[in-house]
Image (cartoon, helix red, strand yellow):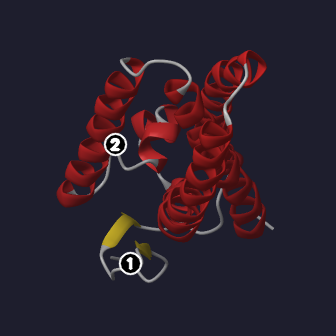
Amino acid sequence: MGREGIRAVGTAGEVVAERAGTGKPGVAGTASAAWALTGVSLLFLFAVFRLGKRGLATLEAGLTPVEWTVLVFLAAAFVWGEGRGALQLRWVPRLVLRASALRGEGRLLHRVLAPLYGMSLVGAPAMSMVKAWGGTLAIITAVILVRSFPEPWRGIIDLAVASALIWGLGAIVVEGRRAFR
């Protein structure tokens, strides 16, 4: 790697992105990095609106005191465990590191697929891609499983997940702004 190269290292010390630098990032590189963060943010927003809509319908139908208690505790657990713990502290920093690496990435495919690149679904070291695709499959499996739940439980879980995603979206905005100042 050249003197101007960049190696983005994750929280566990593993390399999450690597590129040989060519000096200052150009407009295309900066636009690619912005596309990575914007694309992932739009994905989060889409999920929040879909889940939130179902969750609000569940609230409008009414909940028993036990169901309200479950909703409050589940939402708090999801925001703390998934929103803060998994997204804000681990996943979002890696996303921002990989988006930043796109600023000097010369491969057109990685720039076009910037959101997927940022999520380590393409163009990442093999183990990072295995973990990213495994996480994606786990999310798809959870979605399929939760769809089979009866109301109001499905709506309660959807609201809890939406709450965690809102937290994660806020983390993307904050960390993205910090990285691109």
Q: Which mark is residue 12?
A: none
Kind of residue indicated by mark 2: Leu
Kind of residue indicated by mark 1: Gly
Q: Tell me what residue is drawn at x 56 percent, y 24 percent.
A: 152
Q: CA distance from mark 1 to mark 2?
A: 26 Å
Q: Is residue 109 left or right of residue 181?
A: left
Q: Position of residue 171 (x, y in %)?
A: 68, 59
Residue 87 lies, with reference to residue 160, above or below; the image says below
Image quarter hosting the C terminus: bottom right
The residue where tag 2 is placed is: 121
Which image quarter: residue 55? top right
Viewer-nearest of discs 1 and 2: 2
Badge 2 element: loop
The residue where tag 1 is placed is: 2
Q: Earlier in the sequence, mark 1 or mark 2?
A: 1
- The one of 53 and 97 positioned closer to us in this rendering: 53
Residue 92 lies, with reference to residue 68, above or below; the image says below
Residue 157 lies, with reference to residue 62, above or below; the image says below
Q: Tell me what residue is drawn at x 34 percent, y 80 percent.
A: 12
Q: Tell me what residue is drawn at x 69 percent, y 27 percent.
A: 52
Image quarter hosting the N terminus: bottom left
Q: Position of residue 137 (x, y in %)?
A: 27, 35
Which residue extends farthest front?
65
Q: Badge 1 local density, few (<14 within 10 Å), some, or many (20+)?
A: few
